[in-house]
Image: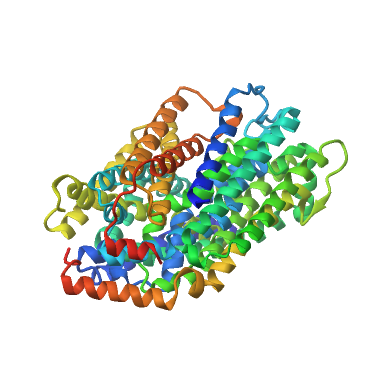
Amino acid sequence: MDRAWIIFAILISLCCVISVMMFFDPDDNGHGVVHPEYSSMQIGGDTERHNGSILFLGWLFGTLQILFFVSLLTFGIHRDRLRPAVFILGGLSFLTVFTMIIMTYRLSLGDAPPQITGGLPLPSALMVYGLAGTPLIFAVLYIMQFDTWILTPEDLEQFQSILDSNKTTGKDDD
Amino acid sequence: MEDQRHFIVLICVGLYMGICVLVGIWSLRRTKSTHDFFMAGRDLGILVTAMAVFSSTMSGFGFVGGPGLVYRMGLSSVWMIVCSSIGFALVYYLMGKRIRLLAELTNSISLPDVVANRYGNESSRFLVAVAILLGVIAYLASQIKAMAMVLQEILSQSAFLGSLSLEWCVAISCAVLVFYCVTGGIIASVYTDLFQGIVMIVASLLVFITAMTAVEGGFTEMTRTLSADDPETLSPWGTLGIFGCLSWYFLFVLGSSGQPHIVTKLMMNKRVSDVRYVMPITLLGLAFSGLLWVGIGLCMRTLVIKGVHPELSHADAAAPQFLQTYAHPLLSGIVFAGLFAAIMSTADGFLNIGTAAIIHDIPRAIKGHSLPHELLWARLVTVFLAVAAALFSLYSGVDLIALLGAFGWGTFAAALVPVVAIGLNWKRATPLAANAAITVSLVINFTLLVLKKGGFQLPYRIEGGAVALLVSLTVFFGISLLSKPKKIAPEIEAVMDF
C-alpha cells in the first residue's frame, strides 16, 4: 500500500479522535485550577483526567501521532533505499516508551508516595529521558547512513550534471 | 560585587549589543548582492548553520515564557522541549538535503521561490508569501515588545536611566537590530546567531547549575516539595492535562519543519552533505537550553512554595527574578545578554524573510518579476518592517500581542508544513492541494484567534494551532490523493527522486 494512503488514514483517525474530544464536556477543573494559596500558579484539577476513557483516548491520540511522525520520516528517503524494518523497530520503541508513560501514570495514581527515577516520578522520567531520547535513534541513523540512505555520491554526481546541463541551456539565468 | 549587580548587567548587555553592531559593520563589506543579503551567498559552514538554526528556534519565549510556564503549570510545557528530538529529526529528514538542492537548482533566494518552482504555480508563491508576512508581523511585534520590556526591566534599576519609557526602550533595542540587519542582511544575522547561540548555551548551563543549588537539598528536595504540594505538578501532564500536552506535542514536533526562519537557514550551507553534522549540533544546543527552561521554572516554584521567595506577580517574572536574586551578578549579566540574544536571533530571521516576501515574492507573484534595485529596496523595507512591527507592538495592547504570537507560530506550522516539508518530498502533491491547505490553515487560525479573544477555549485546552495543522494536513493529503497529479519540471523531479 502506498505510504501516502497510510499517512492519510492516520490523519483521518487523528481527526476522529479530536472530533470525539470536542463532544466531551469537561468539568471546569479538568485542566488545572488556580493554586489555593498562590494565584500565579496552577494545580491539577480534580481526578477527571484520571478517568479511564480520557486516558485511553489520550493514548490513542499519542499513538497515532507517533505513527504519523515515523511514517513521515520515511518520506525523506528514496523508496528503493528505505529499510522498513529499521523504521518499524524504531517506531515500536518510541511507541513502547509512550505506552509505558500512560501505564505507569495510571498505576501511580493513589496515595502511595511516587517512585522517583532520575530525580522525577517514574512516568515523568520516562517522558523526559525516554520520549526525548528514543527518537535519537532516527537522528543517529541519519548521521550514520547519510551516504547510503539520504544522499549518495551518485546522487551528488547526478545533481552536478543537472546543474551543468542547466548552465549550458541557460535555465539558471534568473 | 553584589552592589554592582545592575552596573555589571548593563555592561554585559551593552557589550553584547556592541558586538552585534560590529558584526553588522563587518558583514556590510560581504553583502554585495541580493543573493548575499538573503542567502549569505550559500556559503555557510557547519557550525554557523547549526548555530543559526538553533538560535533562530530558541526565541525570547524559550528564555522567559518557558520557565514561566513551568512555574505556573509544572511539567506540562516540557512537552515543547522533549519534542525537539523527533521534531528536528523530521526537519533534517524532510528538508536537510531537499530544500538545499532545490534552492541551488532553481537559484532561489526565499522559501516562496522554492515553492513556486516546485509546484510551477505563482498562486502558491503568493499564498506562501502572504502566510509568511502575516506570521512575521505577529511574531516580530511580540519579539520587539519582549526585547523592550527586558531592557526596561534592566534599566529600571539604574538611577540615571531608570525612568526611560517603553517607547525609548523599543527605539534603542530596534536600532541595534535594524542596524545589523540593514547593513549585513542575512550574513550579519547568521554570524550574530553564531555568537548569540554560544551565549545562550553557556548561559543555560550556568543557570541550570545555579538553579539546582539555589534550593537546599537540590533536585531531590524540589521533587519532594512539589509532589507534596500537588502531585499533578510533576506528572507528565503537569496541571494542563493529557490532551493539552499532546496537542502541544503535535504542534511543536511538526511545527519546526514549517518555521520559515529555521528552514531557510538550511538553504544557505556551503555543502549539502554538511547537514548530517549540522543536525547533532542543533540538537545539542536545544538540549542545553531545555535545562534553563526546566531548571528556573521548577526552582522558583519550589522557592515560593517553601516560603523562601515571595510569590511572583505573574509567571513570566520567574526568569528575571531568579536572575536578579539567585544568580551571581556576572552570570546574571551573561544571561540577560543571552536573553537579548535569544530574542534578536529570532527577530533578525523574521526581518529577513519578511523583507524577501515584500520585495521579492509578492511582486513576482503579481507582476512576474521582482523589484528593480532589489538590494536597495531590501535595506529600505527592512527598516520599514521593523518600524511597522515596533509601532504595532507599542500600540496594540499586551493581550493582543500574546494572541498574535501564538497566531504566528500556528500560521507558519499549519500553512507551511504540508506545502513545504511534505510537498518538496512527495511528487503526488498538487498546487491545488497546496493552495487549499494554506487557505484553510489561515482561515482556521484567524477564526480561532478571534474566538480566543472572545474567551473561547477548545475542550481540554486542545491547542487551536494543532487543530489548524491537522486539518490543513488532511486537506493537503486528501486533495492530492484524489486529484490528478500535475506534471513537474523534469530537473525538479530528478532532484525529488534523490
Residue drawn at x 30%, y 39% as measured from the top left: B391
The residue closer to the viewer here, B309 or B139, is B139
The spot of residue A28 in percent (x, y) is 65, 22
The spot of residue B172 in percent (x, y) is 33, 51
Residue drawn at x 72%, y 48% as measured from the top left: A124
| Relative side of B361 to B494, left or right | left
Determine whether B225 is above or below B111 in the image. above
Q: Is residue B318 visible?
A: no
Determine whether B485 is above or below B180 in the image. above
Q: Name the image quarter holding the C terminus of chain B.
A: bottom left
Q: Can residue A162 be seen in this view?
A: yes
The spot of residue B311 in percent (x, y) is 65, 37
Q: Please tell me in which quadrant of the rendered image residue A37 appears.
A: top right
Q: Name the image quarter holding the N terminus of chain B.
A: bottom right
Total number of numbered discs in the rendering: 0
The spot of residue B334 in percent (x, y) is 52, 61
- The extreme front residue here reads A1
- The extreme left residue here reads B372
The residue closer to the viewer here, A127 or B182, is A127
Q: Please tell me in which quadrant of the rendered image residue A139 appears.
A: bottom right
The residue closer to the viewer here, B404 or B471, is B471
| Relative side of A158 to A79, left or right | left
Determine whether B401 is above or below B215 in the image. above
Q: Which colour scheme is used?
A: rainbow
| Relative side of A86 to B419, left or right | right
